[in-house]
Amino acid sequence: MSLPLEGLSAIVTGAGRGLGRAEALELARLGASVVVNDYGQPGRDGSGEASAAPADEVAAEIRASGGQAVADLGDVSDHEQAGALVQLAVDTYGKLDILVNNAGILRDRMVFSMTEDEWDSVIRVHLKGHFNTTHFASVHWRARSKEAGGPVYGRIVNTSSEAFLAGSAGQPNYAAAKGGIVGLTTSTALALGKYGVTANAICPRARTRMTEDVFAGFAEPTGGRLDALAPEHVSPLVGYLASPAAAKVNGQLLVVHGGMVAIVERPKVAAKFDSAKETFTFDELDELLSPYYEERPAHETFAAAEVLGLKRS
């Protein structure tokens, strides 16, 4: 019996640790040949010297399990290095079929304290990094489609965050980048659909180096039970979205964690008001909008503990 991703090749960025590692291992388990990309810096803020060790270790783990994998140390926020990453997959496996964008860093600060560099660096790695690899992958798929005279196989899985959906007061750079990734995903889905390529985004929740502060107060399970925040709850969805089974799934945003997948609808109009005359006046807007917002319940912050059923330690 063939595996769902047998004969397909994949790139997973930020695959040396955490979510990316789990995703790379899952794609390999499903039969894909994988390029394990990770810049390898020890600090989650992008600090420290780059190291091949994280990517090499994951690639070796895949090969030890009977799969095919090569490691790549490239910085996806660098346009040329992202292009070299895509070319590595093509040169090694003959083509690229799957792109999973996961690489990212954190530089948290309140908006009134954040420096320009803290803003730029997070936007560069997350949003520009997603664009860079997507650009070169889409060039590859478009050229293959023109040569074939029809659609080819292509899958993009991007990584957004609930910080974009629910807000995150101390992460204006991260929340903005993750919101931008959703916009990039939906635009890409529309642009590449005719070539046979799908693009979707996930909002994963997992206990990783990136979220060690966020989930520090949530107790890990005992008795050998899988942590509800384990990256292994996320990777199966990535495997599914990368597979032929998900051919009809395109331009979607899905939240995933702890044995749960939720499909997020696009924003809906909550209320609509028309001006009595050709245009609104200040007084008319005050009469229409102020009562509407005064009657709405206070905004409730997203409670991870309630959704996950976790208890703080």
Image: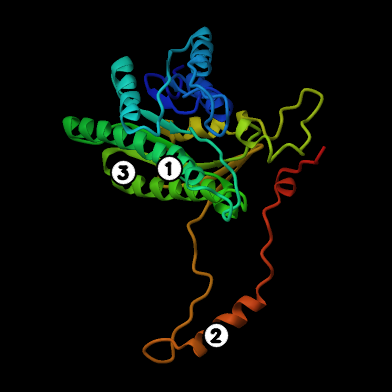
Task: Report the number of numbered marks.
Answer: 3
Image vertical order of residue 290 relative to residue 136, above or below: below
Closer to the camera, 262 or 133?
Answer: 133
If you read the primary sequence from the N terminus, does the residue marked by circle 2 or circle 1 appear first?
A: 1
Q: Residue furthest bottom?
A: 277
Residue that appears at 49% across and 28% down: 14
- Whether residues under marks 2 and 1 lie with C-beta atoms below 8 angstroms apart, the answer is no
Measured in 3D between alpha carbons, the distance from the residue under mark 2 to the one under mark 3, in whole angstroms, is 44 Å
Judging by the rendered image, the residue that carries numbered circle 3 is: 193
Amino acid bearing label 1: Leu
Left of 214 or right of it: where is 117? Answer: left
Classed neighbour count for the residue bearing mark 2: other residues with Cα under 10 Å, few (<14), some (14–19), many (≥20): few
- Whether residues under marks 1 and 3 lie with C-beta atoms below 8 angstroms apart, the answer is no
Judging by the rendered image, the residue that carries numbered circle 1 is: 127
Q: Tell me, yes or no, if residue 85 can be seen here.
A: yes
Q: In the structure shown, which secondary structural element does the residue marked by tag 2 occupy?
A: helix
Measured in 3D between alpha carbons, the distance from the residue under mark 1 to the one under mark 3, in whole angstroms, is 21 Å
Q: Quadrant of residue 215?
A: top right
Q: In the structure shown, which secondary structural element does the residue marked by tag 3 occupy?
A: helix
- Whether residues under marks 2 and 3 lie with C-beta atoms below 8 angstroms apart, the answer is no
Closer to the camera, 204 or 55?
Answer: 55
Q: Residue 178: horizontal and vertical position, in percent?
A: 49, 46
Amino acid bearing label 2: Asp
Judging by the rendered image, the residue that carries numbered circle 2 is: 286
Q: Quadrant for the C terminus, please.
A: top right
If you read the primary sequence from the N terminus, does the residue marked by circle 2 or circle 3 appear first?
A: 3
Residue that appears at 66% across and 64% down: 299
Amino acid bearing label 3: Gly
Q: Residue 150: horizontal and vertical position, in percent?
A: 21, 36
Q: Tell me, yes or no, if residue 247 can be seen here.
A: no
Q: Nearer the viewer, mark 1 or mark 3?
A: 1
Measured in 3D between alpha carbons, the distance from the residue under mark 2 to the one under mark 1, in whole angstroms, is 38 Å
